[in-house]
Image: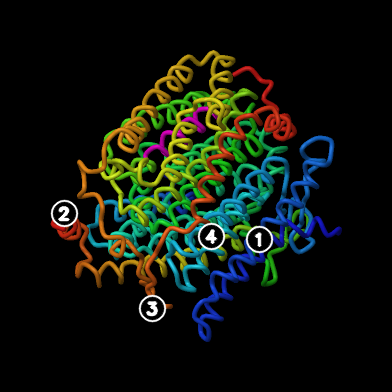
Amino acid sequence: MIELLATRYAYLLMFVLLGIGLYMTIASQNLVKKLIGVNLFQTAIFLFFVAVAYVEVDGEPGGSPVVPATENPASSDLILASPLPHVIVLTAIVVGIALTAVGLALIVRIYSEYGTLREDTLREVRADE
Amino acid sequence: MSSVELLPALLVVVPILLATVPIALGLRYDRTGWSVTLATTVGLFAGTVYLATVVYGGSGTNQEVAVIHELGGFTAPMGIELVADTLSTMIALLVTGTALGVLAFTRVGGPRGNTFYSGYLLLVGGLLGLTMTGDVFNMFVFLEIVGLGSYALISSGRGPEAAVAALKYLIIGTVGASIYLIGVGFLFMATGSLNMLDLAATVPTLEGQNLQLARAAFAFIFVGFAIKVAQWPLHSWQPDAYQHAPDGVTPLIAALVSTVSAYALARLLFTVFGAEFIASTPYASEIIVTVGAVSVVAGSTLAVIQTDVKRMLAYSSVSQFGLIVAAYGLLTETALVGALIHLIGHGLMKAGLFIAVGIIAIGYGARTVDAYAGLAGERPFVAGSMAVLLIALVGIPPSIGFIGKWYIAVGAIEAQSWLVAGVIFLSTMLTLAYVARLLERMYFTPASALEAGHEDTATVGHAVTDGGTATVRGTRVTIGMLAIVIFVAALAVFLGFAGDAFFALLEPFVESADLEVSP
């Protein structure tokens, strides 16, 4: 268990963040905080992808593909972190930003129509109509 | 690279690029959006038809007839492929055809404004991308593009409710797509690849820890898509979104968004994971069947108690997609063909039904089941077409709804899954319950009893809310709108005779899915 915590803490952190994000999305009454929760949820997944890409050979951490990388002492190959997940994360960040922008635009419109950002108040206002 | 191989890429890139044109031209000219969108959609439809003649004209296995475009010239498995095989071509035909029909409705039926048409093109481009992509991460990106397009279109509705419905859809939909992305992450950890065909070759060879990872990936991907396809209890975004979206948007979203997501689920289940993986994973097939079966019962039951017609049809979608998902879980060839036919048939019928609902709202001012009273007498054509489509939805022959359900039922009996066979029978009864309610109102209740349903048509007209073009013309029912609905109703009946043709066209895909395993 201790060893798991020491070596795989990135994955644990990711699932904790994932849980916080999902809880915020469900439990918070504030629409903006809900959207922040969704963002946190997505960020946890990005961290997960970055953690997946990490490579270690005989305790030597792999370098980034852009800067000069560490050499594998055994085979004189370069040890590189996998670049593919990084590309995925970059794309996913762009998608996430677009979603946040649309979400915030919708929240602005809801605020101008109902004058509230709280879900419970919103429910009351809509029930009255 | 021959010119045919460019088509899959053009079908995706052209609508997304041209989505900027209505906004750019909108700076100078007021009403260009519709013309630009029409030209694009006609082009896309023509391109897809040509693609279909090439794909279905060829002979051989699914891989041999498929038209494959390697983006940027990077070969698979490193590069991203766009694949038009026998199944994705059929879905692409449905997407472009429906987009063209719904576009004709929006000419007068609204919503108007150049930004609306930008969203429209973006959505169509995203749907075509989701249909043709051969890469699991690329699928996530297109899933989000489709999502963005639908959120924007739903919120173009007139009332404030539309924004709330769109935000609800955005939050739930994003979580769903993100859960799918986690699944992709696990799959990447297990196999080191993102290309679908490469994954299909790697997944059966996995063992030990990697097999566990692939199973976790399967679970995440299934749950993510259950949200996107709107399976009970993850469907809650769908009724609100369908009900509050403008009348010109609901047919497009109801007919295509969940349909293409369900197609993507089939692609992942049968091409990426493969039937053998599902059969060898404990309880996987049972869980898929149960989720589908529960959605069928819950969706139809909720549909029966609705008063708003759009909302009723939305819950009906939950139950019809439940049938499709349950059929995926049966893992037999017949059930898979049935599910795919029902996927296309349901898309077609829902497009027709929601256009009919839009016409009735514009011309008759009716939105609730009660207000439909006496419709048959006053609007015989639209009421007649709607009746045909509703009866087709129940699954009464000859109609496309019948052949879909028939193949699924035969598949359920082949798999000796009496649960699904029973659920299909029950769902037909429940579908009949809500369809009969509407038919009774339209044909047998006199209008005079419920005069309150007739709102002034002027209040139903759609104002443009996004500020683009501020002109509010009175909406009216045109001959063209009626013609679309009558055409769709006729097509739903005509395709009822085409069961064998569907089977023959889809056979290469179903054979490639390799369903000869006994679950």
Residue B103: which numbered mark, if any?
4
Q: Chain of mark 3?
A: B
Q: Residue at x 47, y 33 (%)?
A: B393
Kind of residue sitting beneath label 3: Ala
Do marks 3 and 2 share a chain? Answer: no
- Residue depth check, mark 2 versus mark 1: number of the one nearer the observer: 1
Badge 2 crowding class, 10 Å Cα cut-off, few under 14, some 14 to 19, many 20 or more, is few
| Quadrant in the picture for residue B467 | bottom left
Q: Secondary structure at mark 2?
A: helix
| Quadrant in the picture for residue B205 | top right
Kind of residue sitting beneath label 2: Ala
The chief SS type of the magenta part is helix
Write down the residue under mark 3: B470
Check the picture and name the quadrant holding the C terminus of chain B.
Answer: top right
Q: Chain of mark 4?
A: B
Q: Secondary structure at mark 3?
A: loop
Q: Secondary structure at mark 4?
A: helix
Q: Which residues are magenta?
A: B315-328
Mark 3 in CB contact with mark 1 (< 8 angstroms): no
Check the picture and name the quadrant holding the N terminus of chain B.
Answer: bottom right
- Residue depth check, mark 4 versus mark 2: number of the one nearer the observer: 4
Do marks 4 and 2 share a chain? Answer: no
Question: Which badge, 3 or 4, comes first in the chain's sequence?
Answer: 4
Kind of residue sitting beneath label 1: Val
Mark 4 in CB contact with mark 2 (< 8 angstroms): no
- Residue B383: give x, y in percent of width and height: 41, 42
Q: Is residue A3 visible?
A: no
Q: Nearer the viewer, residue A42 or B25?
A: B25
Write down the residue under mark 2: A127
Write down the residue under mark 1: B42
Mark 1 in CB contact with mark 4 (< 8 angstroms): no
